[in-house]
Image (cartoon, rainbow, N blue to C red):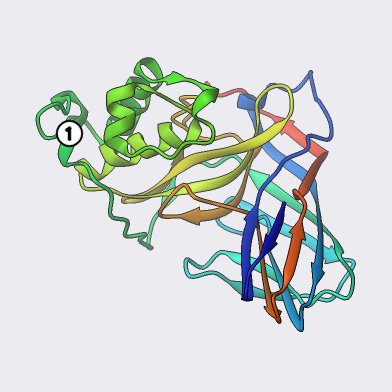
Amino acid sequence: MRILMPLSVLMFIMYVVPCYCYENISPYNVDYVVIKVIQKIKFEAKNTKEIEVFSYIPQEDFFQKIISIEADQNFTIVKDEFGNKMLKFTPEKNEIKITTILEIKRRKSIPNNISFPFKSDFTFLNSSFPLVFGYGNDFQKFGKIAQWIYANIEYDERYGDKILSAQQVFEKRKGVCDEFSTLFIAFLRKLGYQASYEIGYAFDKKDFRAHSWVRIYGKNITDIDPTWCQMPVDALHIKFASLPHAMFNETKIIAKGNNPEVIIYPQEIKFEIIEYKESPLV
């Protein structure tokens, strides 16, 4: 893609290239993994006096710990407005390679002392919200909602390039992981819970793919994957960001100059599982 813009260029691209297929792994049973994530960024720039490249990386949180991170060019660590870490480069060449090794544990519920205020429209649910969702303890409520969405929303890859509101998802009853998460968050907001989109990658029994799930900020931090009706979420979910919306792109380039011209290629991401442990949920 070629872009010609005055003064500055701001562009985001996300792309995934699976590296390995692990046919013997049952992802739902994986509760610990050590994994290497390799990101490759490639771009071309002309007529630029200054260029900066930003890339999201796997995040650290209660369940995810970075063991090491390195790149073939100098970088500094910065944060976006929601506290997600990014690597910032003033590149000397037009290719960047980032290698991160991290360990991830199954995302079991843990006590919560933080919040993630997020405004989402749930007024359309006033006349159609199943009252049964409001009964029981937190986990029972979350489970009922996740099961309802899993049973009533059809996964349809034709919606992969669309952005639907929660009301549109509720009416169409179709979508991909973003739509499942969008509707799930609307149900949660209706019940008074705060929630965020967890954006990253997950293993779907064949390879890793771009994926989103939901983090709930109640008395406990609870991660649930409404697309796969999974609670708690397995350790093969790799988080790159927590966001109040599903619009996410891993790479950002800002270029300044006299009519700068930028060509950016899809970022390649490969995953190598170094170690994993399975422990079936009872």
Residue 248 placement, left or right of 9: left
Residue pointed to by mark 1:
125
Indicate the amino acid at tag 1.
Answer: Leu
What residue is rendered at 38% in x and 63% in y?
114
Count of marks, rendered view: 1
Considering depth in this image, is 121 or 147 the residue closer to the camera? 121
Give the vertical position of 85 relative to 215 (above or below).
below
The answer to which image quadrant residue 57 occupies is bottom right
Give the percent coordinates (x, y) of residue 80: 54, 69
In the image, 157: left or right of 54? left
- The local secondary structure at tag 1 comes to helix
Q: Residue drawn at (66%, 48%), measured in percent from left and top?
A: 14
Q: Circle 1: is it few (<14), some (14-19), or many (20+) Cα within 10 Å?
A: some
Residue at image point 42% right, 34% down: 179
The structure residue drawn at horizontal position 63% and vertical position 69%, both measured from the top left corner, is: 5
Q: Along the line of sight, which residue is nearer the eye, 105 or 144?
A: 144
Q: Residue 43 vs residue 255: left or right?
A: right
31 w.r.t. 238: above or below: above
Q: Nearer the viewer, residue 60 or 198?
A: 198
Where does residue 207 sit, x and y in percent of width and height? 74, 28
Residue 254 picture location, percent across and down: 66, 72
Q: Residue 87: where, in percent of width, then height?
A: 71, 69
146 above or below 236? Answer: above
Which picture quadrant has residue 25?
Answer: top right
Query: In the picture provided, is 151 more to the left or to the right than 19?
Result: left
